[in-house]
Amino acid sequence: MFDRIKSFASDFFVTGEPMIYASDVAIVLVLAAIIFTLTFLKKWKWLWREWITTVDHKKIGIMYLVSALLMMFRGGVDALLMRTQLALPDQNLLDPEHYNQIFTTHGTIMILFMAMPFLFAMFNIAVPLQLGARDVAFPFLNAVSFWLFFFGALLFNLSFVIGGSPDAGWTSYAPLTELGFDKGPGENFYLLGVQISGIGSMATGINFLVTILKMRAPGMKMMRLPLFCWSVVASCVVIIFAFPALTVALALLMIDRIAGAHFFTMLHGGNPMMFLNLFWVWGHPEVYIVVLPAYGIYSEIVSTFSKKKIFGYKTMVISLMIISVVSYFVWAHHYFTMGASAGVNSFFAVASMLIGIPTGVKIFNWLFTMFRGRISMKLPMLWTLAFIPCFAMGGATGIMLAMAPADYQYHNSYFLIAHFHQVLIGGVAFGLLAGMYYWWPKMFGFRLNEALGKWGFWFFNIGFYVCFMPQYLLGFMGMTRRVSTYSADTGWTDFNFISSIGAYLMGIGFLFIVVQVLYSIKYGERDLTGDPWNGRTLEWAIPSPAPHYNFAHIPEVKEVDAWWGMKERGESLVQLNRKKKFTPIHMPKNSGIPFIMAVFFFISGFGFVFGWYWIAALGLLGVAICMIARSNNRNTDYHIPAEEVEETEAAYGRV
Amino acid sequence: MALSNNEAKQRSSKHDTSRLLEYQRHDGPLNILGFWIFLATDLILFACLFATYLVIRTHVDGGPTDKDLFEIPGFTIETLLLLTSSFTGSLAVYEMRNFNKKRLIGWLIVTVLLGIGFVGFEISEFVQYVGDGATMQRSAFLSAFFTLVGTHGAHVSLGIIWMISIIRQVVKFGIEPINARKVFIVGLYWHFLDIVWIFIFSVVYMTGVVS
């Protein structure tokens, strides 16, 4: 009996790696510390009532942000491990198998569990406030989305200590990921973790599209929408049309693995290329899903910090929508070398290059907005300024990759690695950080320390170029992606060493950001005005942090920069409070169902990972019961009494 | 009829009665638009399954082909059952507009029964194929067939459970804006599945039989 338990445990838990034992200890210690602190401070009830059951978009946004930053840490540590392994030739820090796991988790986490939730944090925090709305269209569904992401990410990360990490790359190409080549539960963790959080992403896409189409303040026509909201529209449209393809790709591979079907196998007529097609039909639009909202953030910031109306509002909107449509017609550029006909490759090459045109329009519009503006160099603007040259360079190398014949040379080399890191870090991560700095006072009511932030900014930026510029050259020298080591006579040592130094500089930059947050929690300048940057859109018209109901009175919108226009006319929401009677505000009630339902999803996913189907079925049953319970619940909303609204506004000094 | 009409108007006097019942509460239009967009995502999901099916339809690996497998009476009965259920589903919404609770419930029950009949025939079709050795594991074609048609069947089964839950709520709360919205939305879902079935009928079964 004991032997059986022992042999089960040695399969179940990942063993044999000192690094993993250290993580086990760290996980247990952190969990114990969290449980102890919550119990000691008697905060369990608070946690449940204020956070776990919340349907408030502002709090959900904060939870997304915290999760994203934690995942950025994990993905970043993976990156540093890889760069340490590659710093010198013939190193043995990571064996090839472990290296495969690390680059797989790095890629999956950074795209799906860092960029996506970071983005959704920005959606949640800014969109309803910019629209003059009191919440999103479906607050309950919004909580469901968050918890599905959370437990999907948890399931994926669990593979590190239980069962073993996935190791087939973040793209998880078949037939390598078929049962015949990849037995372990790691790949199942990937399929289910990504699937569960993907359902949440799809729901978020629907939620925010409906919110923007239906819940704008009176007078806010579509062509008066803040550009960030427009970018969310574009991004949501792409989510809605692209994510189902991922769902299908993962589901079919799952069916192959657990039911022995033959979609992507080498035997019995399977077609592995079909997986690549389905994956990239989602995968390429996915990069536009993450970069479009970043464009929106830059547009808000450039306009605010140049104290000018955005240059070419209409062309900005048109180019966003063009990008969202053309993004569906570029996916095959991920495998020009597959051997498709010249016609197919030309089509996808031309479509890929076409995207550069609307993107170029946007870059020029940002530059023209800054032209003769009174620019103030605050942190959000600094990251935006760093973005422009970085992204332009990444775009140019993208055009090089888009040329099908030339791609035969660059394909899967470090040139590609450098390119997509330059657009994803320079485009997306810079944008998300800029957005975080920009909306931080609105989220928490205080500003982040500028000096520490600037240290972080310079370390991260200089580190970025030191890290990735040598990788372009390594690509030209023939270094391919996903190699775990190389020998000295390849001549790659110098550039690899420089690149690793850059990675560590970026790590230091990240640490500065962490220190900056911790320092500012204690010493940060409180934002008493609600409008720390002299902003232009409605979120700056209300106090920081925004009250539970956002707007005591919904303002009437007359132009694109609604709040700026009000300020120019000497109007404010305080006047509205004085002029109009307070009325009860209709709000959604908190609910524990989203959390419980996501726990059942997690249980079910865990059952599938190990092939324990009775657990999987139990989990799905729990999900169904949660749905029926929700459907039968008629007590889902309430009214905040007018007196309470008045009291809250009075506490902010706004009556 | 006039009486029940008045009764219903009285009950919903708080709401904007110039609009259809399902649009009268503030969340009605939001949920309905949201559901239309959800259907768009579901449509893409089926489109991907259809694309996969078409790519590997002929990859039979020496096993049974679609022509060997499909029998005209079986899928014709399934089609008739599902198309009829779509019609009875519309009748249910029609009776809801007339505020006739009994008939609404009656037509919903008929719709559910036809749906159950459809799923039953489909299961027996699958069981027969498996008995003949045409399992999902036999060839890529069969993997794609069972997955595409099975996904549709799973959608219908889910719709049945959903509709039963809504019948229960109509019995309990009557015809009011929330229930009207739910009946309308489950109706959208049901018609959507009907449209997908028409594609399955023509792309999978008809093409299979004539090829």
Image: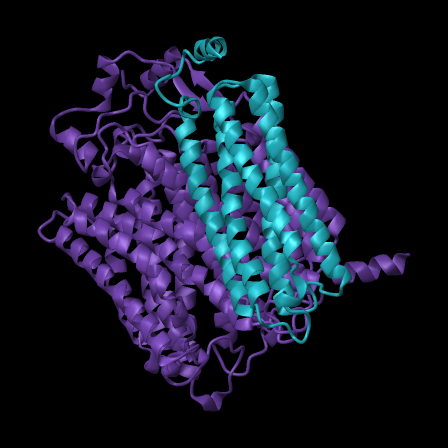
Residue A398 in the image, given as x and y percentages of width and height: 31, 70
Please indicate whether residue A408 sits to the left or right of residue A199 in the image: left
Q: From the viewer's perspective, is residue A465 above or below residue B48? A: below
In the rendering, at what x and y percent does residue A527 appear? 30, 33
Image label count: 0
**Residue at 53%, 18% in the rendered image:** B100
- Asked if residue B206 is positioned above or below residue A513 in the image, the reply reads below
Question: Is residue A550 in sight in this rendering?
Answer: yes
Foreground pick, B70 / A273: B70
Residue at 62% over, 76% down? A266
- Which colour is chain A painted? purple
Apparent colour of chain B? cyan
Q: Nearer the viewer, residue B75 or A381?
A: B75
Quadrant hosting residue B84: top right
Looking at the rendering, in which quadrant would you find the N terminus of chain A? bottom right
Front one among A123 and A176: A176
